[in-house]
Amino acid sequence: MAPSKVEEVSHHTSTAKPEVPDGLKLIQAEKLDLRSDEEIAAWLQLRHPVTSDKNVWAFWHSGYSKMAPWVQRNVINWVRRLGPEWTVHLLDRVPNSETNIYHFVEESFFPDAFNNNTMDGPHVGPHQGDLIRLPLLWKYGGVWMDAGSFLFRHIDDICWKEIEDPSSPYEMAGFVIEIRPECLTMLNGFIAAKRNNPFIKRWHDIYLALWEGKTNSHGFHKSPLLKHLPLLCPPVDKMNCPDLGVMMEGFSDYLSHFMAFERLRKIIDPSDGFNGPEYYAKHMFLASALQETFYFQQVTGWSGARQFELLTKQRVGEGVVKDETWQAAEDFVKDALANTSTMKLSHGPPGALDSFLADLWDSEEHHDKDNIEGTFAAYLRYGSVHFDQTRKLKPLEFDITKEEILHLGVLEPKKD
């Protein structure tokens, strides 16, 4: 059956009845936040009280107005999709801003370089985000999501029902990837936990210690807390990814937040009995990042140019040509909407890949290409708000008997 035209696919006022692909069902309008984009955008720039653990936390150091339009639309769509039970907080570092991070987290949670605005190097923005995400979860609970993420599944159905269920063993959730051969670790672009989570606090303590006396992450992999861990070296052949055009030392420094996680999940602390391996295996609801957040990258060989080509393709309307590119885009969008939780787009590390979709959409020339009516990109956005998945997300299981276990204090270096 030919696909029906979806009018105003990016907006909640669509009057056309859309087709519903396999594996999906249409969400009832009353479950959505039906304010206009402009109303939600204005609301996001105000400070909102924390009234429960149902918070989504995101950060853009220069504030909402400085975000690329595609990133703004991401966050607006989170608000619309999640409805009134969840509060999205978009924080920043703008002086005198209503949504400045210091309205929520005290200076004591951050290193001097953050508090004094002396952070330098090529990754200041991402590393500021690394420093604020865990304190927010520790103090208030909820989910951290990187602003460059599309959300295709309600957070309740990704993991929150499990975290809230008193009969469930799960207290924390996220997506894991093979960061070096046969070694899985959790990404930090999606982290879920209720407030006062014991793993979240210790994870931040390790990362904060790396910044003592530092203004950038250069050499973090040599820190006494991390040097016992091998350099990060993703098995790109398994990921359908080209070789990363970066040195693994710099890559490991850039992703030192991941390494801090890996350190903690291997530690049993004799001082208080905290058992990282057991917590990782029994209390974390972890799914595959290659399926749940990097699916699009895999099917396009991690090529931003190819992703741009597919999503810019006209899906419906006059003159549509259903060629191989159209079919590839159709297959991707329907599969992503039905079988992945998020789509994470990033800008780096610089030089790692030939092209990044985020960079293309950032450019002034392509500011609207993620949302042009009738395109696959607009249909992807429409589906992310209006469709519910019917699949059940199942966590991975881990055998910790093969893991290296360290009996160390959380901030105690491993002896050579």
Image (spheres, grey):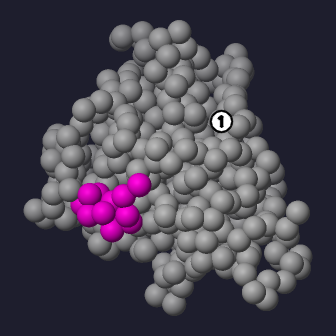
Q: Name the residue under label 1.
A: 287
The percent coordinates of residue 340 (x first, y second) are 68, 47
Residue 219 belongs to magenta span: no
Residue 259 horizontal side relative to residue 133, left or right: right
The percent coordinates of residue 66 (x first, y second) are 32, 74
Q: Which amino acid does label 1 sit on?
A: Ala
Looking at the rendered image, the quarter that the N terminus falls into is bottom right
**Res 121 seen here:** no
Residue found at x 53% / y 78%: 361
**Quadrant position of residue 175:** top right
Residue 44 belongs to magenta span: yes
Vertical comparison of 378 with 229: above or below = below
Vertical comparison of 45 with 413: above or below = below
**Quadrant position of residue 52:** top left
Residue found at x 43% / y 14%: 274
The percent coordinates of residue 105 (x first, y second) are 20, 42
Q: Magenta segment, principal secondary structure?
A: helix
Q: SS class of the residue under badge 1?
A: strand
Nearest the camera: 163 or 80? 80
**Res 176 seen here:** yes
Mark 1 residue crowding within 10 angstroms, few (<14) / some (14–19) / many (20+): many
Vertical comparison of 207 with 239: above or below = above
Residue found at x 34% / y 30%: 53
Nearest the camera: 405 or 83? 83
* Magenta span: 34-45
Q: How many labels does the image show?
A: 1
